[in-house]
Image (spheres, helix red, strand yellow):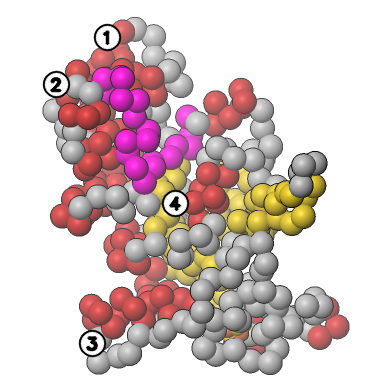
Amino acid sequence: MQNSSLLEIDNLKKFYPITAGIFHRQVGEIKAVDGVSFSVHNGETLGLVGESGCGKSTLGRVIVKLEAPTAGSIHFQSRDITFIDRQEQRKIRRDIQIIFQDPQSSLDPRMTVGDSLEEALLLVDRTTEAQKQERIRELLGLVGLASEYADRYPHEFSGGEKQRIGIARALAVNPKLVVADEPVSALDVSIQAQIINLLMDLKERFGVAYIVIAHDLSVIKHISDRVAVMYLGKIMEIAPKQDLFAGPLHPYTQALLSAIYDARLHSDRQPILLSGDVPSASRIPPGCRFHTRCFRVMPICPKVVPVFAEIAPGHFTACHLYPACTPPAETSPTP
Ligand code: SF4
């Protein structure tokens, strides 16, 4: 099920200029996404985790073409969609959809749920009114809502129900890939599991692939097949879920996991506390960008950028603790 590549991201970058003065002269740039590469296979769920401000939501918005990248490439089903015009973007929305953190933001308060779903269906060629109404009833049923809800307005629904409608909107066009940006973080804990289970159920039924963006590792652990850990605009580690949770390689991943291990699984273990704040994305530290907070930092770390290398089958990381990640001295980038 998960052997063919649906999405290929290569060295993707998204920078925002920092300007100053009355002529808005560029004086720097915020490197929100700074050279990210990964793939997503058909029917796979890739969890993308990291602290807030690490660039994961920006990455999601670039993938669904809500923002243009600065550099790099995005291939979807082997087609280069890095820079496409509005008409092509509209076409690609049939295949790549997004679910937002705040379900309210994807629903127009002046439109009934039925109208909102009908609007989403405009992306596909459904000819008759009867077919559209049938599809709307079907979509509401898929996400566990009664068909009578089609006549109601967003304010009449709870947060969980609104997110179900957001999911129905995303699925209306039978997409192959859905980017779910913090799909449950705005919901009550009691509702979160229902929505996660709904997403997993829909994946089983329709074979849709997900990129689930979340800061909550327990959500990521529950839903993902593979997990990518992002820090300050870059992927630090990527691995099958079991491998990452059983044996995290990168000190940043180890620190993230230690917090949930300590609280929920191993109350005898001390969590790894990271020192300092996440540096600004406009002043990325040289060498390994994590070195200012790393509890395993070595003399080489601030000087040489570690290479992203495969340490075990399917398990990649970028850290000088692993010899494969340290480039030969003559090719080492200068700090
Ligand atoms: Fe820590 Fe050095 Fe590894 Fe970076 S390269 S994560 S600073 S040990």
Mark 3, other Cα within 10 Å: few <14 / some 14–19 / many ≥20: few
Q: Is residue 244 above or below residue 180?
A: below
Question: What residue type is disc 3 on?
Answer: Ser
Q: Nearer the viewer, residue 285 or 3?
A: 285
Q: Earlier in the sequence, mark 2 or mark 1?
A: 1
Left or right: residue 178 compared with residue 323: left
The disc, 1 or 3, on the residue closer to the chain's N-terminal end is 1
Would residue 111 be seen by someone viewing this image from the given angle? yes
Locate the C terminus and report the quarter of the image it occupies: bottom right
The residue shown at (44%, 51%) is 211
User: Which amino acid, mark 1?
Assistant: Ala
Residue 223 horizontal side relative to residue 267, left or right? right
Say the numbered circle drawn on residue 267: 3
Quadrant of residue 155 in the image? top left
Check mark 4 vs ligand 1: CB closer than 8 Å? yes or no.
Answer: no
Instruction: Report, in whole angstroms, how far the alpha carbon at label 4 lies from the one at label 3.
Output: 31 Å
Q: Which residue is painted at 81% across and 78% down in the image?
A: 334
User: In the image, what residue type sits under mark 2?
Assistant: Glu
| Distance from the alpha carbon under mark 2 to that under mark 1 | 16 Å
Rounded to the nearest angstrom, the CA distance separating label 2 from label 4 is 31 Å
Check disc 2: other Cα within 10 Å, few if <14, some if 14-19, many if 20+: few
Residue type of the residue flagged with mark 4: Ile
Give the residues in magenta: 94-114
Q: Which mark is residue 211?
A: 4
Q: Which residue is mark 1?
A: 130
